[in-house]
Image (spheres, grey):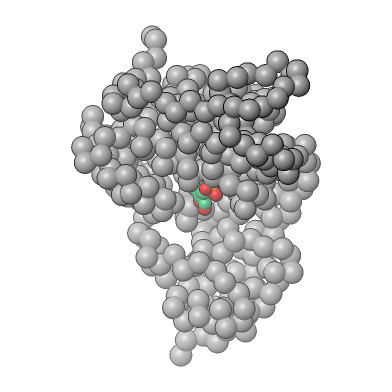
Amino acid sequence: MKFDATSYLRKRLLELKPYQSARQEFVSNGESMIFLDANESPYETDLNRYPDPLQLELKALIAKWKGVRIEQLYLSNGSDEFISQVIMGCCEPDKEAIMIAPPTFGMYKVAAALLGVQVCEVPLTQTFELDVDALLDRADETVKILFIANPNNPTANAFKPEALARILDHFPGLIVIDEAYSEFHDAPSYISQLDKYPNLLVCQTFSKAQGLAGARLGIAYGHPDLISFFNRIKAPYNINTLTLSTAIQKIDKQEVVKNQVKLIIEERKRLEDAFSTIECIQKCYPSDANFLLIQVDDVALRYKQLIDKGIVVRNTSKYLHCENTLRITVGLPEENQALIKAFQSLNPIK
Ligand SMILES: Cc1ncc(COP(=O)(O)O)c(C=O)c1O
């Protein structure tokens, strides 16, 4: 059956004539040219020219690395930008909604609120699993996008493949699987399912395992008809030249990233083992990510005590089903050792 991307997209944006940047009108054939088309400074600074609006050099490398086609790729100023763009492009303000499964990454809800889009919340179960029946029951024609972080933040777990398969088979709208932490989870990416499910979008980020949170770069993958729409509605130069060149170099350094990921996973296990012996830690949830979610006896007290010892963690108690929890990123071995020592020095509550 032919895929009709337009059924997922806002009608009025389909009619929009996008901004045409100077660099899109002229495609170089490699010959040296005099550029007098974009009102740039002619004085060389390495950054005096606008970047390629479609980032073709970087996309070609990503396509080869990830085994996808360039037309399946959308690059964003961090995954955060893609999350906003997909909501903006697909949901009619005040009328349509996104669906999320709290507790989950906070930006889905914030981006929807900023864009005047409603949020349909279908909580995870107490054991942090997807409630697939409820998600499918609540999915009506106004719910345009379902966001699932896999592995999830702040709960740290990846969801069961059977649950995700049922959602992919039955959810009627777009499904965004956010794989920000996928490098820390030993399972195939959902990119491999793109051909089977044209309503699936996958996003990944350079901010976590790739070590480039400061560069702001996200990769989204999807059906070429959806991707070309997102490219049409984006800001023309959403990825800057410094980020492009940094990412191009990073792709060559995947052996280093792999070793760092391996070490972080070993350290995660070391922290889990140590936490099981610490009195004020009541529970450490299993993790498929580069952080651990723990439940403590008194979250405000323990958070403050760690701060006093110079260690900043995240108090995640306000998230649904996460009372008295702290989210702790796995750091360098010596940082993790300092954390263990800090916890060991805390007195039990009388
Ligand atoms: C699930 C998830 N998605 C996306 C992001 C943000 O990614 P980026 O830095 O690329 O905007 C985060 C950051 O914490 C996250 O936890």
Percent of width and height locating residue 35: 66, 27
Front-lying residue, 240 or 87: 240
Total count of labels: 0
Given residues 193 and 15, the one toward you in this image is 15
Rendered residue at 69%/36% (across/down): 42
Answer left or right for 306 relative to 112.
right
Evaluate whether residue 161 shows in this view: no
Q: Position of residue 76 (x, y in %)?
A: 53, 38
Give the farthest residue toward the bottom: 350
Q: Residue at x 61, y 81 (%)?
A: 309
| Residue 302, image x, y percentages | 50, 78
Q: In the image, what residue occupies the spot 68% across and 68% down? A: 336
Where does the image place residue 55, in percent across and percent down from the top left?
A: 62, 30
Left or right of 77? Residue 93 is: left
Is residue 224 found left or right of 259 in the rendered image?
left
Any part of residue 121 in sight: yes
The one of 216 and 340 positioned closer to us in this rendering:
216
| Residue with the most extreme top position | 1
Quadrant of the snapshot with the N terminus: top left
Can you name the residue that lies furthest to the left here?
95
Q: Is residue 151 above or below residue 63?
A: below
Which residue is found at the position 75% from the left and 18% from the top? Answer: 31
Specify the quadrant of the image occupied by residue 91: top left
- Say whether residue 96 is left or right of residue 348: left
Return the residue nearer the eye: 178 or 240. Answer: 240
**Rendered view: 283 above or below 251:** below
